[in-house]
């Protein structure tokens, strides 16, 4: 036992470092995935929760055949029962309803203007009495039978705006009498129950005399039965999914169940966007998982390299002891077993790391095998190196730098194999991706680390001749520090291949994280430019003609471009309707000025900005619209009127139309003839400059107020102007669901990369400290000062460390470009694909890391020399004399 304690004390430093590295691996392997899972799951819930009911809920709709006798409540239960468990068990609320189609539900006798009769959809279903309070009258109870009055209730706000009260009557289709029997007040107008019927809460009040009033009134099943012969009645069964039960572990099953649910409707069809929303999130999550995996593997590979270096230091310090044991007849396995018992002290550190990792909040990940493999490496590294050293103890006294210059066939084969593995991995990553099947391939995730290690090997083979040449040049200069330092650097470069490889991997991991972060930031900047096409956007219903001039007069505004949007304009070709398109009318010259003043790097086609007045308007169209138009004569509706246009150019996109839009038509405002232009009204403006948003909002509200006052105006009309700045849009991209995961991955990569790089530099110092200690001790007798001794260390390490840091930085910057298809960075940039951005700060950070590394080297060297007691080396003439 005493012998074991003595051996542990002799290697306490390296053993403690092994324990710390293993503990860090436990946190990285078990804790980091839990944090990432927690952030991803939170992002999933935050993405799904604000979705509208059409995307978040499962809604089955059907019409009831005349001879059918099913009950909607019973059908609600039956439909839920056939869903897959992944969906069925996550349904937190469900409702059934039936309602008349609003566009075919006109009424008369309400007392409202009836140039276009009001449209009152009549609705009945479950949940109303639980979601609202009766403030006046009673709940509807329509008596069955012919010639009965349909009893209805409506919300208090609607009753006031529609001038209805308890006892008011009107006629459905001017035939069936209806009576208001109650006024209700919703518990929560923002509650999900009211989402399908917004006009049930607040009626649509028309802004001109051509629009009808639109509202929803509530009745019962008996009341709807009296109306089903006059207007179509649609049944719906709606199921709300509990977002609190969603996480990435169940996401594939939920997506599959939602896809299958489309075929499981009982005589009904499903309306939902849940499967699409979840699939899109899964795509973003896979891309984030790929980034995190690359960073994690890089950090773990660096930790593993440091483990091997620590084991090597421990074994090299006891080389003479192992040689003596072999000389006395000790078996290799016996010697290895001694060190195995010592390295088992790493296991408690692994347990502590595992416990700390599992204590991190978040969903656990199946990464225990990673920690087990790492712990096995930490435990077995010392015994294996000990047995390898003991196999040929005659080398224990040779100079490491001389031995390292002889590169054997096995080592060359290993180095070439490493390069081949890295190259093949890059090719596979570009061809297949990193997580095509949803699971990250460990080999492919390790490709950046392999490439960095391969670059380190190549660098170590190139450096010695170059440094030797510099050493020969230093001979001609005065002083021995430069010559001796460069000479030792050339000889020992091969001996420090381990620390150099670890340093390159660590630096490349950190720079890779910074480079990808910079690329994503640049992509989001570009996406914001394309989404905004201006510094500020002002949107509303319609503005009068004076608004543009008043906006231009707001302090800070340098350019204004008006536009009008028809989100669903009818497209006709040769007098035949082809569907709807997104139509944008934009002032071309003003648009070009806004782009120039805003600094948005977009060049609009000359056919658009230079178009003159013409009865047939030259337009830019999307490929989808161009396919529909073909060789025909197209027309598009704007505010209810058809306009002829021609295809001036086909464009894949046009800012500020949303990226990915496939069916749009862009018409130059200035090309409309004067008589046609009078019918156009701006619905928004693109602005350049840095004005006060509140001032813009006030001008916009005044412009809408003037427009609304020129003709028919609903008494409850309130102008609402929306002002959106470039910074607001850019911030919204940073608030995407998986952004927290990406930030976490970059923090791991940059943080661990820098720390582990400094550790690698420390090992580079330690690996040559014995030889330098002897040299310094002898040179001191020749008059070498302490300052010159430190200079000797800097000259020796500076070439290797500098080239290693620069190599790691180069690999880190190049890696995103090499494996860009596998990273899927466009999923984080609103679909915008951008080249890898080079941040000049990376070069500055590399220089700073070299300087900090040199300071670290000096500190480690000083501590090591004190440990060796160099004075005793001089007195006894043996380096081993200074060992404690």
Image (cartoon, helix red, strand yellow):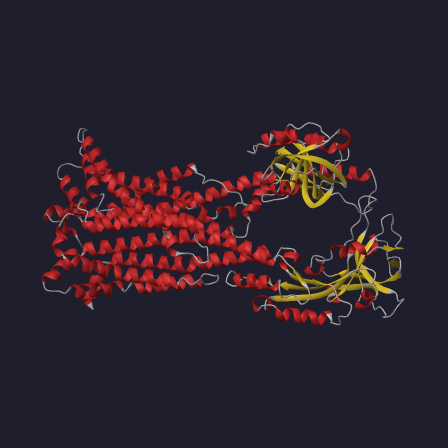
Residue at 13% across, 65% down = 330
Instruction: Tell me residue 545's x, y (percent).
Output: 75, 33
Residue at 40% across, 51% down = 295
Q: Would you say residue 686 is visible in this rendering?
A: yes
450 sits left or right of 744 in the view:
left
Q: Nearer the viewer, residue 81 or 513?
A: 81
Q: Nearer the viewer, residue 18 or 667?
A: 667
Instruction: Tell me residue 709's x, y (percent).
Output: 81, 39
644 sits left or right of 349 in the view:
right
Q: Nearer the viewer, residue 325 or 528?
A: 528
Q: Would you say residue 788 is visible in this rendering?
A: no
Quarter occupied by residue 92: bottom right
Q: How many marks?
A: 0
Instruction: Tell me residue 527's x, y (percent).
Output: 55, 41
Quarter of the image with the C terminus is bottom left
Instruction: Tell me residue 66's x, y (percent).
Output: 78, 68
Quarter of the image with the N terminus is bottom left
354 sits left or right of 411 in the view:
right
630 sits left or right of 472 in the view:
right
Residue at 89% across, 60% down = 175
Answer above or below: position of 839 versus 350.
above
């Amino acid at each position: 036992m005493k012998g074991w304690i003595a051996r542990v004390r002799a290697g306490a430093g390296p053993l403690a470092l092994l324990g710390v590295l293993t503990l860090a691996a436990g946190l990285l392997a078990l804790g980091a995935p839990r944090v990432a899972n927690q952030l991803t799951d939170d992002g999933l819930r935050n993405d799904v929760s604000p979705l509208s009911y059409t995307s978040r809920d499962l809604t089955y709709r059907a019409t009831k055949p005349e001879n059918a006798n099913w009950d909607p409540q019973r059908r609600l239960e039956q439909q839920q029962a056939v869903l897959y468990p992944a969906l069925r068990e996550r349904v937190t609320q469900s409702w059934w309803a039936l309602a008349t189609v609003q566009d075919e539900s006109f009424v008369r006798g309400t007392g409202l203007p009836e140039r276009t009769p009001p449209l009152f959809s009549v609705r009945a279903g479950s949940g109303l009495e639980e979601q609202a309070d009766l403030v006046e009258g009673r709940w509807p109870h329509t008596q069955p039978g012919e010639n009965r009055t349909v009893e209805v209730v409506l919300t208090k706000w609607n009753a006031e705006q529609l001038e209805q009260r308890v006892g008011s009557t009107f006629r459905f289709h001017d035939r069936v009498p209806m009576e208001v029997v109650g006024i209700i007040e919703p518990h929560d107008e923002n509650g999900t129950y009211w989402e399908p019927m917004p006009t049930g809460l607040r009626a649509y009040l028309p802004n001109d005399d051509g629009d009808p009033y639109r509202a929803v009134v509530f009745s019962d099943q008996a009341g709807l039965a009296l109306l089903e012969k006059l207007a179509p009645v649609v049944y719906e069964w709606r199921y709300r999914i509990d977002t609190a039960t969603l996480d990435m572990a169940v996401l594939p099953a939920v997506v599959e169940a939602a896809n299958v649910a489309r075929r499981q409707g009982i005589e009904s069809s499903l309306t939902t966007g849940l499967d699409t929303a979840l699939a899109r999130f899964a795509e973003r999550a896979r891309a984030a998982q790929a980034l995190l995996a690359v960073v994690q593997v890089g950090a773990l590979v660096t930790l593993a390299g440091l483990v091997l270096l620590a084991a090597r230091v421990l074994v090299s310090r006891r080389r003479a002891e192992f040689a003596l044991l072999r000389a006395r007849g000790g078996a290799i396995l016996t010697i290895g077993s001694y060190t195995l018992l010592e390295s088992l002290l790493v296991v408690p550190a692994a347990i502590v790391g595992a416990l700390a990792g599992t204590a991190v909040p978040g969903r656990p990940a199946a990464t225990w095998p990673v920690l087990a493999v790492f712990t096995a490496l930490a435990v077995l590294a010392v015994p294996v190196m000990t047995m390898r050293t003991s196999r040929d103890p005659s080398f224990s006294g040779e100079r490491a730098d001389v031995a390292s210059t002889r590169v054997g066939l096995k080592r060359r084969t290993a180095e070439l194999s490493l390069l081949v593995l890295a190259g093949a991995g890059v090719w596979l990553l570009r061809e297949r991706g990193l997580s095509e099947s949803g699971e990250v391939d460990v080999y492919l995730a390790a490709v950046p680390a392999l490439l960095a290690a391969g670059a380190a090997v190549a660098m170590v083979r190139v450096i010695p001749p170059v440094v030797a040449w510099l050493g020969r040049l230093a001979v001609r200069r005065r002083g021995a520090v430069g010559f001796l330092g460069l000479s030792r650097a050339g000889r020992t470069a091969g001996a420090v291949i381990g620390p150099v490889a670890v340093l390159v991997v660590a630096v490349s991991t950190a720079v890779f994280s910074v480079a990808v972060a910079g690329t994503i930031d640049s992509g989001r900047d570009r996406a914001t430019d394309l989404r905004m096409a201006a510094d500020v956007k002002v949107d509303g219903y319609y503005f009068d003609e004076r608004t543009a001039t008043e906006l231009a007069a707001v302090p800070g505004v340098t350019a204004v471009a008006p536009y009008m949007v028809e989100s669903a304009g009818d497209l006709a070709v040769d007098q035949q309707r082809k569907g709807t398109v997104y139509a944008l009318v934009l002032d071309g010259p003003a648009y070009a000025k806004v782009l120039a003043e805003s600094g948005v790097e977009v060049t609009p086609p000359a056919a658009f900005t230079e178009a003159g007045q013409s009865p047939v308007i030259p337009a830019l169209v999307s490929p989808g619209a161009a396919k529909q138009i073909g060789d025909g004569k197209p027309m598009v509706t704007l505010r209810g009127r058809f306009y002829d246009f021609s295809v001036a150019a086909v464009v894949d996109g046009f800012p500020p139309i949303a990226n990915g839009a496939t069916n749009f038509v862009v018409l130059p405002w200035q090309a409309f003839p004067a008589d046609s232009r009078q019918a156009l009204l701006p619905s928004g403006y693109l602005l350049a400059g840095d004005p006060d948003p509140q001032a813009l909002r006030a001008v916009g509200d005044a412009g809408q107020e003037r427009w609304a006052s020129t003709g028919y105006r609903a008494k409850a009309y309130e102008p609402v102007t929306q002002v959106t700045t470039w910074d607001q849009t850019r911030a919204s991209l940073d608030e995407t669901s998986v952004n927290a995961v990406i930030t976490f991955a970059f923090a791991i990569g940059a943080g661990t990369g820098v720390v582990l790089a400094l550790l690698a530099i420390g090992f580079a110092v330690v690996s040559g400290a014995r030889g330098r200690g002897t040299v310094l001790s002898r040179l001191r007798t020749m008059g070498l000062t302490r300052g010159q001794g430190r200079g000797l260390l800097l000259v020796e390490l500076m070439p290797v460390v500098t080239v290693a840091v620069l190599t790691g930085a180069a690999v880190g910057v190049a890696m995103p470009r090499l494996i860009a298809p596998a990273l899927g960075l466009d999923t984080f940039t609103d679909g915008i694909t951008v080249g890898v951005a080079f941040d000049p700060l990376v070069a500055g950070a590399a220089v700073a890391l070299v300087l900090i590394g040199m300071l670290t080297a000096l500190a480690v060297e000083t501590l090591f020399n004190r440990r060796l007691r160099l004075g005793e080396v001089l007195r006894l003439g043996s380096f081993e004399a200074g060992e404690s």
